[in-house]
Amino acid sequence: MKILIVEDEQSLRENITTYLNSDGNVCESSADLENAILKLEDYAYDCVLLDLGLPDGEGFKVLNFLKEQMRDEAVLIISAKNSLEDKIKGLNTGADDYLIKPFHLAELKARVEAVFRRKAANGNNNLVFNEITINLQGRTVEINGKPIVLTRKEYDMLLYFIANKGKVISKNAIATHLWGDEMDMNDNFYFLYTHIKNLRKKMLDANCKDYLKSIYGIGYKFLSE
Amino acid sequence: MKLSAHYNRSNIIITVSVLLAGAVIYYFAINYIIQKQLDRDLTEEMEEIVSYVASHHKFPVQPDIDEEQVTIKETSLTNFKTVFFNVPFKKVINDDDDNNGRAVEMLVSVNEKNYLLTIAISRDGTEYLVQVIATITLILMAGLFLVLFLTNRYVSHDLWKPFFYLLQQLKAFSVSDHTNFSYSKTNVDEFNELEAAVLLMSSRVRKDYRTLKQFTENASHEMMTPLSVITSKLDILIQDDSLNPEHYKQLQDIYGATSRLSRLNQSLLLLVKIENNLIDEAELLELQQLVFEKKEQFQELITSKHIIVTATITQKTITASGHLLDILFNNLFSNAIRHNIDSGVINISLTDEKFLIQNTGSLYPLNEEELFERFQKGKKSEGTGLGLALVKSICNVYNWDVSYSFISSLHTFQISFAPGKE
């Protein structure tokens, strides 16, 4: 996947690049609007990560540019503005998703893959990872060709893990993904543990390799091999 | 009291006192002038008599007119200064009607004998003059009262029309809408000035409001960016294989603190937004649907704590912001679960008048006064301390009444949708 990161905060830009630069992804970045449009004029990308508050203007200009040129880049807005107006405006101008800062990089990666999949889905809605096959449309999972029944949360979690395979994901990131930001879940890692335990058991029961590794005290890792 | 009444009152007080003072001064002035005139008449009379006496060496025969009465008395005085004085004046001798008069007394010597001569005249005519003046003053005063009353009643009502028009617009003024003030096209300078000032003020207020909105968003942006840098740095850092469990523990604490800080920041900004009425989107919501969805959303947490939920929900539609109601119910539900005991109970009830959520928990009632204040939280609470403050603010936006009570060992939060109607 070729990704363009438009973000003015240097360290954040670097971290996103570092995190997304795996799985054969290629990241390029731009710190301002002008540079971003120059890059988009010359190259095609699969996905654009777009910060709205840029030093030389609002990120909406990039969206308008893409719309005028009838480009099919998937756009994910990353904004510090938790404003409904901006969200609606962004989504109406052609953005595919809206992520509010601060976010976990694991969340960002999962969202990027999701919007990319949605754009690139050519009738093929299956996500295959080794022996695991996920039907994204029907939200069903097969392991070694045999269907397993997952709850909604377990399904979401599996998708999240596969998007971030090979990375250590913090418990906070998973909890935020499952329950959202507004639920105060600091003391509820216990629930997370239960969900993960159940998911792992269901996968192991279907003769799946044990991909889920617990990383002491901090979170989990879904092995990429 | 109305301004016109105030104005009239002072007007009347001033006019009446000026008129009264004028009348008094007028009275004395006229009195003085008349007295001078009378004295002059008396002097003339006196001189006539003196000249008559000088040529005839006897007093003239008293003319039979009752306008002046002359008395002559023999006296032993040899030296007497001529005096003028007021005397009672009787038209006819032994008349009961006591009139005022003016008299002069002087010494006249006829044939080596001294006589005291007194001439008195009536003041009747002058009294009449004073009466006329008093009557005119009274009529003037009455006329003035009448004019002021009519002015107040009819003229000033029309005069104040632009003012009341402006007042009406001011009452309907809201910073968030953009309807401008309309002019009433008056030719009163003061009202034009007032309208201009109000227009200036309203545009300034709206500008401040926009600035505040801008500030809220900027503050959010400025704080969220460093927070997202911290979060992403942590996300990268934990990928390092060389970290040991002790490091992980430290990192987990930083994660916890960071997410708490970001939640705190979000809540604070939301609180500011709500209290400044920056959220004014509204839609028609099926409340029973919303409550049901919340119950589903929290189902796992409820199940894992073995909490039994009983819900009596009737249909209720409401016009409000979906976003705000989501926050409201999130806070109430997560509180009811978080502060609950294992195998506890939650009762939910929704009727047309109110929403009620009850939960088991601590055996002692909470302090209702402090409960809805900012940063008030239980000792064991991991929350931001803003949850119930948010609930309260959201209820205030829609004029709902939120209250806490401790009923048969159940912590009860109640939202009345139409307070005061019960």
Image (cartoon, helix red, strand yellow):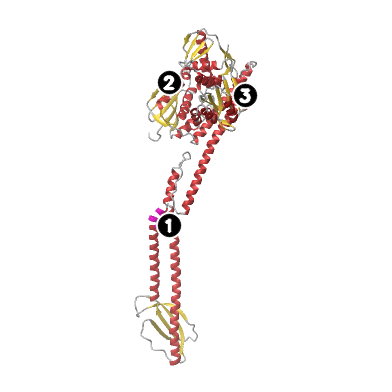
Residue denoted by label 3: A14
* Residue B309 tag number: 2
Along the viewing direction, whichever of B307 and A163 lies nearer the viewer: A163
Query: For the residues tagged 1 and 2, is the chain the same?
Result: yes
What is the magenta range? B151-158
Residue denoted by label 1: B8
- For label 1, count other residues whose C-alpha is less than 10 Å away and answer few (under 14), some (14-19) or many (20+): some
Q: Position of residue B205 (x, y in %)?
A: 51, 42
Q: Nearer the viewer, mark 1 or mark 3?
A: 3
Query: For the residues tagged 2 and 3, is the chain the same?
Result: no
What separation in Å lies between label 1 and label 2 (alpha carbons)? 70 Å
The C terminus of chain B - image quarter: top left
What residue is at 36 percent from the left and 82 percent from the top?
B66
User: Looking at the rendering, which quadrant does residue B72 occupy?
Assistant: bottom left
The kind of residue on which mark 3 rests is Glu
What residue is at 48 percent from the left and 40 percent from the top?
B175
The kind of residue on which mark 1 rests is Asn
Chain of the residue under label 3: A
Tag 3 secondary structure:
helix
Left or right: B97, with B191 as reference point: left
- The residue furthest right is B242
The kind of residue on which mark 2 rests is Val
